[in-house]
Amino acid sequence: MGRPQFLPAGHGFAWHSAVARVIEEALTKHLPQYHLQQHFYQYTKQGGRSSLFNKQQYSSEEPNCRARPSSRAVPKRVELIPASISHTPKADPATIIVTGTTGALGTYVINSLLQLQSEQVTRIYYFNRLKDAKNGQVKNCQAPSLKTDILDDRMIFRDSDLSKQNFRLQSRAIYDELLNTVMLCLHNTWPVNLNLSLTSFMPSVDGVIGLIDFAAASPRSPIIQFFSSVSSVNRYPGTEVPEHILPDLGTPELIDHGQLKYLSERLLDYAAQHLGINTISVRTRQVAGAARTATSWNRQEWLPSLVASSTFISALPAPISPPTQVSADEPINWIPMDYLADVLVELGLNTKLTASKDNVGAKIYQITHPHAVPRAQLLPAVQQGLRASGMSSELPVIPYVEWYELLKAKSTEAEENTDQANAALLAHNHPTMRLMDFFWGMHYQGDSGLRMKLAMEKTLEVSQTLRNMEQLKPEWMAGWTQDWIRAPWRGY
């Protein structure tokens, strides 16, 4: 019959009901009693945009009382899972699974791993859903922005899907081999498109659950390291977010991306406490492009989109990084992607975990640049990058609200004057058209998210790279700007 899995695969009612019960058990000590299952299923079925964690949407039998821990909330399939065979990871040279390797961050993680000696890392499995991931990965790793010139024999490529049984590998034998060898799972896969609905993120949650089931079944007790985000804690009411799991459901940002990052953190914490496996969640603030080459910042993210669209409407906003309520002296603490990859590898390989049989829960690390620079330095560096990109004149700088109104007017005009055949080209030249509500929301979000600090004491102890990281440099910002403006139109 086979070993029971942490949660069943698929997206039917049974799956959503099981997830709801896991969440309910994990959070019941901290929230009023509520009926989550029906709401969760209806939400995902309809693909809605309302808040998954809005407490006002839940019906409550006893709205003013605290819920009591209840074993009935634990899914029966979870109760059947035996505890991890071995609670402490072995000290052998590491065999590692890396997910999301065709993305920019994943490629830099690969580069960081390949700089290590074989005595530290003996084998690296690259998990991708693409049928021909190897050729794309080879091309990425041979890019001039990376140190790796050739791919060595430690690299093994697997067409896989973490949300499917046995990771959808070619055979059960391959899965069993991974069970008996893998020491660390660096899980970086997650959609970054801000326009996606909650249902689009659910396969990613499935993947987290697949890794939990894998780690619980392994005699090696592999560490699961999940790449989370500050969006999972962006509504934390205090001034400094601690390095541990936060129980309040109002903590994540009111966007699907942040809410499901938060959900994944909670599932990993629950699994660490109840299944005896080792889990790490790493929260980060804004990830920038690579510092060493001033390239590789995804043009589809909010700041590249803002700068690209500013060239389309011939004006830059002040401040260039909203919200407008903060001063020019407020710090910029973005983390360059190549340095972040080095830090993630350090955290995964150097973490000293206590035995999970003690039910200590997930370990939390938080990454932001330890040496921030004033926000005022951002705009001159962008202007420098635009000049270097070949712009004949410097863009005027106007107040953010005025810039947004101009953006909206130019967007409407452009859409009316663009036929279907050229719509994709317009979206390339003017990418903020897809994110108008997002940019207006950034203006009104207030400064709490920016002033809120991430505690990093434990993270700094483990990562030498983070402790010694150099400040963000204007030439990096100028280089990233050139990269965005010179990005070729590929006709998609």
Image (cartoon, rainbow, N blue to C red):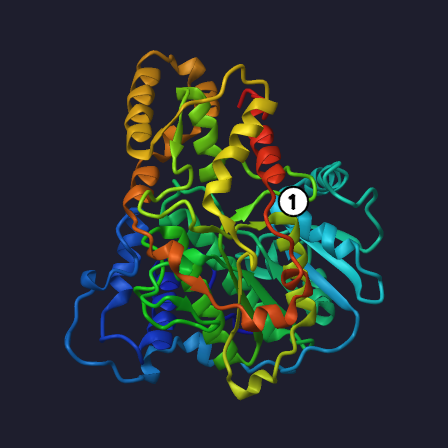
Residue 36 visible somewhere in the drawing: yes
Residue 289 place in picture, x, y as percent: 59, 42
Residue 69 place in picture, x, y as percent: 31, 84
Q: Looking at the picture, does residue 194 appear above or below residue 255? A: above
**Residue name at image x 48 percent, y 68 percent:** 455
In the image: residue 414, left or right of residue 243: left
**Along the line of sight, the residue nearer the viewer: 103 or 445:** 445
What residue occupies the far bottom of the structure in this picture?
358
**Residue name at image x 20 percent, y 64 percent:** 58
The secondary structure type at the circle numbered 1 is loop
In the image: residue 96, left or right of residue 492: right
In the rendered view of the protein, which quadrant contains the N terminus?
A: bottom right
Residue 402 place in picture, x, y as percent: 29, 29
Q: Looking at the picture, does residue 227 appear above or below residue 323? A: below
The disc labelled 1 sits on which kind of residue? Answer: Ala
Residue 332 place in picture, x, y as percent: 49, 49
In the image: residue 266, left or right of residue 250: right
**Residue name at image x 64 percent, y 37 percent:** 295
**Residue name at image x 60 percent, y 51 percent:** 471
> According to the image, label 1 marks what residue?
291
**Along the line of sight, the residue nearer the viewer: 48 or 75:** 48
In the image: residue 309, left or right of residue 162: left
**Along the line of sight, the residue nearer the viewer: 25 or 355:** 355
Residue 81 visible somewhere in the drawing: no
Q: Looking at the picture, does residue 289 appear above or below residue 117? A: above
